[in-house]
Amino acid sequence: MKDIKLYQDPRYDNQDIYKQIENGVYKVVGKTNDMVDIGEGVMALSITLDDSPEEVEMRQYPLEDILDEYDLYMSHLIKDEPGDKELLVELAGEIDDLKRAKEIIGKRITIEEYEKDGELFARIILGD
């Protein structure tokens, strides 16, 4: 994955539902049509996938690793067209976890598998 940016979802302009905490991170203060509870935080990202056909085809796996790493969940799939390299997603969870996840913005992400006690695990490697 490369070219990860904050995405300003137009839904966040509704101040009856979303309160900006910091650039790109919002607290849900009103009822949404998504599965996000009042009090949780949200952040929308634009993710450009690498040119490799494997990454475009298997796009959910790096995203799942990001969700696991930062203890977040995908609350809304804004844009996901087959064969398109750009993916727009809304991530949700605790506000502190969203703030921590902002470290991936502007970074290139690779997933490294490693073995520990006979089990296979994955970790996120951030690069420039």
Image (tube, rainbow, N blue to C red):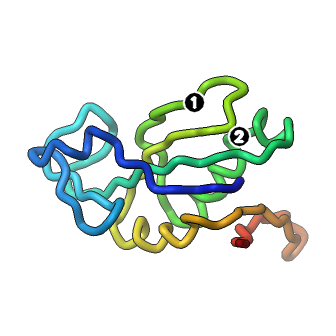
Q: Position of residue 102 (x, y in %)?
A: 48, 68
Label annotation for residue 59: 2
In depth, the one of 41 and 86 nearer the eye is 86
The C terminus lies in quadrant: bottom right
Q: Residue at x 69, y 56 (%)?
A: 2
Q: Mark 1 falls on what kind of element?
A: strand
Q: Position of residue 94 (x, y in %)?
A: 35, 64
* Tag count: 2
Q: Residue at x 23, y 58 (%)?
A: 27
Asked whether the residues under the numbered discs 1 and 2 touch, taking CB atoms below 8 Å apart as contact, a structural biologist would say yes
- Indicate left or right for 66 with 108 as reference: left
In depth, the one of 67 and 10 nearer the eye is 10
- Indicate left or right for 127 with 54 as reference: left
Residue type at mark 2 is Arg
Q: Residue at x 22, y 37 (%)?
A: 32
Give the Cα separation between the discs numbered 1 and 2: 10 Å
Q: Disc 1 marks which residue?
A: 80
